C-alpha cells in the first residue's frame, strides 16, 4: 500500500520540495541498485510529517540494517550481496544526512559512514577500486574513487564523473559505474569537497575558477599505466556544470564531454543583458567565455529535460544562436512522453545515462580508431 502522503508524482511532502526531491531520487536509485522500492515505501510510512529528526533517524536505521547485511554477507564470502548492501547503505546514509544543517555533527557522522561503505564496496569488487587523492588548491585536495574496467588489465578508456560543487561522489558508484562497466570503461568519480565537511561549500562557491580542478585530474590520469589517455571523457552530473564546460576550453586532452555546454553561462548573459538593457553582452560579468561561443575540438553532449529549469525551446534557441560552426555540440532533449524530462533527469536517470554512455562509447571508440 502506497502511503497517503505520496502522490502519483512521487511527491512525498508537498510543503517540502527538498524532501520530496530526495525521496524521488531514492526511488529512482532502485533502478540502479542504490535502493529498493519496498524499503523506500516502508520508510515513507514511518516518517513523521514536518519532523526532520524522524527523516534522519529512519534512514539512518535503514542504512545500518543494510550495512550489517553487507558485513554478514562478506564474512560468508558472498561478495555480490555484500556489494549490493553496501551500495544501498551508502545511499541511505546520504539520505539521512540530507536535511540536516551542514554544521550539524550528525550530518558529518552520516557522511563518514557513507564513505566507509563506499570504501568497503570498492575493496570487495573484482578488480578492486581505490580511493585517490589529487592535488588542487593550496591546503585542499580532490578525493576520488577510481573503479577500473572489468578486464583489469591493459589500458582502458576512462570517464571522469563530477557533480555540482556541493554534490558528493558516492552516488556515482551505483548511478554510473554499471553503465561504465558494461561498456568496458574505467571510471573516476570525484567531488570538489574532498575530505572537507559540507559547510566547505561556501568557500567553493566563492571561487571563480572551479574549472581549474579538471587539468589537475587529467595530470593525475596521465600518470596511470591502466588509462588509455587518448580516450578520456568527462561527465558533469547535474545542472551546475558550466565550470566543466569552461574546463573543456582549457583542456585539449579530453576526448569527449557531457555537460551543460555553457548553457547556464549563456542564459545568465542574456538575462543580465535584457534586465539592464545592455546592447553589448560582452560586458556582462560571466566568469569565462562559454563553450559554445568559442572554438573547442572536444565533442560535447548536452542533455536536458523539457520540464527542467531551462525550458527546451530556450535551450534550442541559445544553441542555434551560438557560433557552432567550429564546435561539435549536440543537444538532446528528453520529453515527458519518454520520461527523463525532469530537472537533471530526476524522474528517470537510467534512461538519460544509457543515452549518455552510448554517446560516450561512440565518441571514445572513434578516438580509439584514430590511434
Image (spheres, grey):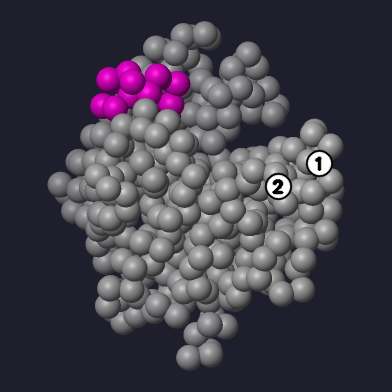
User: Disc number at residue 278?
Assistant: 1
Near mark 1 (Cα within 10 A), the count class, few <14, some 14-19 or many ≥20, is: some
Q: CA distance from mark 2 to mark 1?
A: 8 Å
Which of the two residues, 162 or 98, is positioned nearer the viewer here?
162
**Quarter of the figure that contains the N terminus:** top right
Give the secondary structure at mark 1: loop
Location of residue 288 in the rendering, given as x and y in whole percent from the top left corner: 59, 53
Which residue reaches farthest left? 75
Near mark 2 (Cα within 10 A), the count class, few <14, some 14-19 or many ≥20, is: few
User: Disc number at residue 283?
Assistant: 2
Q: Please give left or right for residue 319 compared with residue 127 in the image.
A: right
Location of residue 371 in the rendering, given as x and y in whole percent from the top left corner: 48, 91
* Residue beneath the point at 65% across and 17% down: 14
Q: Please give left or right for residue 55 compared with residue 314 in the image.
A: left
Q: Please give left or right for residue 288 compared with residue 154 in the image.
A: right
Location of residue 188 in the rendering, given as x and y in whole percent from the top left corner: 38, 60
Which of the two residues, 51 or 314, is positioned nearer the viewer here?
314
| Residue 95 belongs to magenta span | yes
Location of residue 175 in the rendering, given as x and y in whole percent from the top left corner: 48, 50
* Residue beneath the point at 81% across and 41% down: 278
* Residue beneath the point at 40% across and 19% down: 101
Q: Cβ–Cβ below 8 Å for labels 2 and 1?
A: yes
Which of the two residues, 255 or 148, is positioned nearer the viewer here?
255
The span shown in magenta is 94-109
| Residue 43 belongs to magenta span | no
Amino acid at each position: 500500500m502506497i502511503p497517503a502522503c505520496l502522490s502519483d508524482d512521487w511527491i512525498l511532502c508537498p510543503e517540502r520540495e527538498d524532501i520530496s526531491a530526495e525521496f524521488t531520487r531514492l526511488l529512482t536509485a532502485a533502478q540502479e541498485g542504490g535502493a529498493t522500492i519496498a524499503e523506500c515505501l516502508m520508510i515513507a510510512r514511518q516518517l513523521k510529517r514536518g519532523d526532520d529528526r524522524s527523516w534522519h533517524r529512519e534512514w539512518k536505521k535503514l542504512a545500518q540494517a543494510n550495512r550489517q547485511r553487507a558485513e554478514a554477507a562478506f564474512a560468508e564470502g558472498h561478495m555480490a550481496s555484500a556489494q549490493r548492501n553496501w551500495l544501498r547503505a551508502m545511499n541511505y546514509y546520504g539520505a539521512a544526512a540530507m536535511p540536516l544543517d551542514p554544521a550539524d555533527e550528525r550530518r558529518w557522522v552520516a557522511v563518514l559512514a557513507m564513505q566507509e561503505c563506499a570504501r568497503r564496496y570498492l575493496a570487495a569488487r573484482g578488480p578492486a577500486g581505490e580511493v585517490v587523492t589529487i592535488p588542487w588548491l593550496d591546503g585542499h585536495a580532490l578525493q576520488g574513487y577510481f573503479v577500473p574496467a572489468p578486464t583489469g588489465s591493459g589500458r582502458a578508456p576512462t570517464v571522469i564523473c563530477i557533480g555540482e560543487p556541493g554534490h558528493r561522489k558516492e552516488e556515482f558508484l551505483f548511478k554510473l559505474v554499471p553503465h561504465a562497466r558494461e561498456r568496458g570503461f574505467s571510471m573516476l568519480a570525484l567531488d570538489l569537497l574532498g575530505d572537507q565537511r559540507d559547510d566547505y561549500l561556501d568557500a567553493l562557491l566563492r571561487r571563480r575558477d572551479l574549472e581549474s580542478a579538471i587539468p589537475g585530474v587529467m595530470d593525475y590520469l596521465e600518470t596511470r599505466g591502466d588509462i588509455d589517455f587518448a580516450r578520456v571523457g568527462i561527465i558533469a552530473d547535474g545542472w551546475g556544470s558550466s565550470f566543466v564546460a569552461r574546463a573543456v576550453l582549457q583542456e585539449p586532452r579530453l576526448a569527449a564531454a557531457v555537460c551543460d555546454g555553457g548553457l547556464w553561462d549563456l542564459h545568465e548573459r542574456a538575462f543580465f543583458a535584457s534586465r539592464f538593457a545592455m546592447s553589448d553582452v560582452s560586458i556582462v560579468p560571466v566568469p569565462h567565455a562559454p563553450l559554445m561561443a568559442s572554438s573547442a575540438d572536444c565533442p560535447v553532449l548536452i542533455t536536458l529535460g523539457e520540464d527542467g529549469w531551462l525550458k527546451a525551446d530556450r535551450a534550442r534557441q541559445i544553441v542555434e544562436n551560438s557560433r557552432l560552426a567550429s564546435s561539435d555540440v549536440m543537444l538532446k532533449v528528453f520529453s515527458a512522453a519518454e520520461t527523463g524530462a525532469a530537472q537533471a533527469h530526476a524522474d528517470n536517470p537510467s534512461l538519460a545515462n544509457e543515452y549518455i554512455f552510448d554517446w560516450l562509447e561512440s565518441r571514445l571508440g572513434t578516438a580509439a580508431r584514430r590511434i
